[in-house]
Amino acid sequence: MAAERPVHPQSSGLPVKTTARCALSPIRTSAPVTPASGSGPAPAQPAPSPAPSPDTRPVLLYVDDSATQRAVVTALLSRTYRVVTAEDGAAALTSIRAEAPHVILSDLQMAGMDGEALLRRLKSDPALRLIPFILVTGEGNAATHSMELGADDFLQKPYGPEELHARVDASVRISRMVRELRAQHAEMVRIHCESKRLELELHQAQKLEAVGRLAAGIAHEINTPIQFIGDNTHFLGDAFRSLEEMLTLQRQALERAAPAEAEALGADAERLELTYFLDNVAATVRQTIEGVERVASIVRAMKEFAHPDQKEMVATDLNRSLQATLDVARNEYKYVAEVETELGELPLVTCHAGDLNQVFLNLLVNAAHAIGDRVKGTGAKGKIRVTTSLDGGHVTLTVSDTGGGIPEAIRDKVFEPFFTTKEVGRGTGQGLAIARNIVEQHRGTIHFETVVGEGTIFLIRLPVSPEPPGQESP
């Protein structure tokens, strides 16, 4: 330390060799007494020492290149603070990262990184700039110079113990207030994020309920005309078969009774393409019935998928729900993937079927998109595999795809709200976040396994009969 008078604990000037006067007196102990033979029973074994309590004192980092000065300041402040020392600015930076001090007390002039360089480093770091910094200097204009450098407070040499304590105590109070404000801010941010999440869930629930009602209403409206179209088409098919049989019998009778008239009738039939009509009407009616049945199955799937009025958990056939969801989502995957199902025998599962259908739909759509991105432009198709199985009191459902897999860098984010790698208009980043929330509301779990270049499998595990909130089994 260059030509600066050190601090003295008892006066305004501190001689360098007075540190012993500030040290705590050692505790004197007596030598152990050994009882004489036969003088009485052996002494009881001492009780084990209690575990040391954690040190809750505020942390002060003192930076000075004088070992003597470090010892003196430590002796003065160690009753109130846990004093950590460093010999220069570089060592102080290491200690700051390890100790997170409440206050930094640093000499200005030091070998190596001095106090000014350390101060500039800290004030340029957003994570450290709010730590109160007290600059110690022997310059005559200490206050002005310290404030110009960006220090929060200063100590001008020589100074006494009272001033040292006063300055450090004030900075520690400021530091504690800053930490409390940071904690309050973090809590406010957490509450705000939680509020936004709940708002999102409420909005999504309302949206799903509205979509469910709309889908159920559309399904109901479509179902009625589809039913009479199907019934009328079946009637036309039956009537045509009767008409065809009648025409055949009439032709045979006419050929036997009046060959000339039969020949003329045959010419008329050829002119009117009656043979073509008889050959193709049956196939046309059959294809129409197949189309009507397909539309009817989609309508049934929509009604099964929606469940708009379901407020309580009910016993549900999850295999049937999965099949209905596959029907509803068919347009998403039919051009890019073949679907393979392996649905095991399951008991009825107590759940909100409409919510779980939304989970299944999100997973199927994501699988289709992952495969679509991989096979785009090749004309090839990938594979989506859906399985269910029973494992004790739980059911396990899996949806796997042969897409490109999930990169390692984003695996921790896939369940975060609004996180998406899809282009605008193709995804909102809410699908998997909603899926996890719904599964957790059913006391279940959802996770995934993925291999880049090979694909991803999502696994859902649900209790057959979930416990009510607050009554989960230990």
Image (spheres, rainbow, N blue to C red):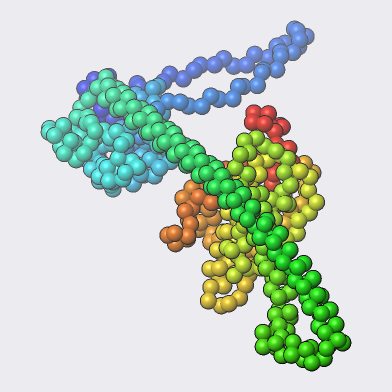
Residue 104 point in image, percent of width and height: 32, 34
Instruction: Locate residue 338 relative to residue 57 in the image: left or right.
Output: right
Query: Front-most of 454 and 101?
Result: 454
In the picture, which quadrant includes the N terminus? top left
Q: Residue at x 67, y 88 (%)?
A: 271
* Rendering quarter of residue 275: bottom right
Residue 146 point in image, percent of width and height: 18, 36
Instruction: Locate residue 465 relative to residue 71 in the image: left or right.
Output: right
Residue 317 point in image, percent of width and height: 74, 47
Residue 139 point in image, percent of width and height: 15, 35
Q: Residue at x 51, y 56 (%)?
A: 410
Q: Which residue is drawn at 62% across and 16% down?
A: 32
Instruction: Locate residue 369 relative to residue 400 in the image: left or right.
Output: left
Query: Front-most of 66 and 248?
Result: 248
Can residue 403 be seen from the camera position used here? no
How many numbered discs, if any? 0
Query: Front-most of 291 and 187?
Result: 291
* Rendering quarter of residue 241: bottom right
Can residue 153 be seen from the camera position used here? yes
Q: Which residue lies furthest to the top in this view?
A: 39
Q: Residue at x 55, y 42 (%)?
A: 209
Q: Looking at the image, is 22 positioned above or below residue 420?
A: above
In the picture, which quadrant includes the C terminus? top right
